[in-house]
Image (cartoon, rainbow, N blue to C red):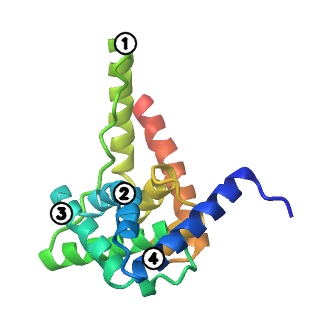
Amino acid sequence: MKVLADEKFQVVKYSDDLVLMKKIAARDESAMSEIYSRHAGPLTGFAKRCLAHEADADDIVHETMMEVWRRPERFEGRSSLKSWMFAIARFKSYDRNRKSGRTVLSDMEDSRVCEDALPSDALAASQDASRVRAAMNTLSEPHRRALHLSFFEDMTYKEIAEVEGCPVGTIKTRILHAKRKMITVLGQMEA
């Protein structure tokens, strides 16, 4: 059986996460520090999209990391560590929103423009980012999350399904419908 370079990298990364989780179960703080440095940034971005107030994202990341530290045995290795942690963050975010009676007002991260870009390029990129944000806001929350996890967090359909707690087919359908709606809305903005 031939293993593609990408698949090989995923296998190595996955087995490395398993080793780190075993070390965390043995109360190795350096392993927890490694997990934190690898996953805190993407978790923060994800939590910001799940919460009504972005300021709560750091708390959700902290609570997620504490869950990993307190209960590493809950990670069974059936999914990637990343998708398991995103699922924890998702549930904690929803719980926070539910308890406070907030509704989620998700939005895409602000676009960053290269410092070397010409002013006309920067203006065009800013306008494009505004159109994409506006188009993303027309999507339902499940469609927006699936699209974000796929494109911005580079998760596979299987990982997204694990985070969302639904079948892979549902995720494929959500992403397909989200892409179609984005194309339609962006096309209408151009007209």
Q: Is residue 155 above or below residue 17?
A: above
Which residue appears at 16% of the width and 57% of the height? 55
Report x, y in % for residue 131.
36, 36
Q: CA distance from mark 1 to mark 2?
A: 34 Å
Q: CA distance from mark 3 to mark 4?
A: 29 Å
Report x, y in % for residue 98.
20, 77
Residue 118 image label: 1
User: Which amino acid, by three-letter code, is at mark 1?
Assistant: Leu
Marks 4 and 1: which is nearer the front?
4
Task: Determine which residue is flagged by label 3.
Answer: 56
Say whether marks 4 and 2 touch (CB < 8 Å).
no
Which residue appears at 51% of the width and 42% of the height? 183
Task: Determine which residue is flagged by label 2.
Answer: 37
Of marks 1 and 2, which one's residue comes earlier in the chain?
2
Marks 3 and 2: which is nearer the front?
2
- Which image quadrant is residue 18 in? bottom right
Mark 2 crowdedness (10 Å alpha carbons): few <14, some 14-19, many ≥20: few
User: Which amino acid, by three-letter code, is at mark 3?
Assistant: Asp
Of marks 3 and 2, which one's residue comes earlier in the chain?
2
Say whether marks 4 and 1 touch (CB < 8 Å).
no
Task: Determine which residue is flagged by label 4.
Answer: 23
Mark 4 crowdedness (10 Å alpha carbons): few <14, some 14-19, many ≥20: some
Of marks 4 and 2, which one's residue comes earlier in the chain?
4
Would residue 25 be found to the left or right of residue 52 on screen?
A: right
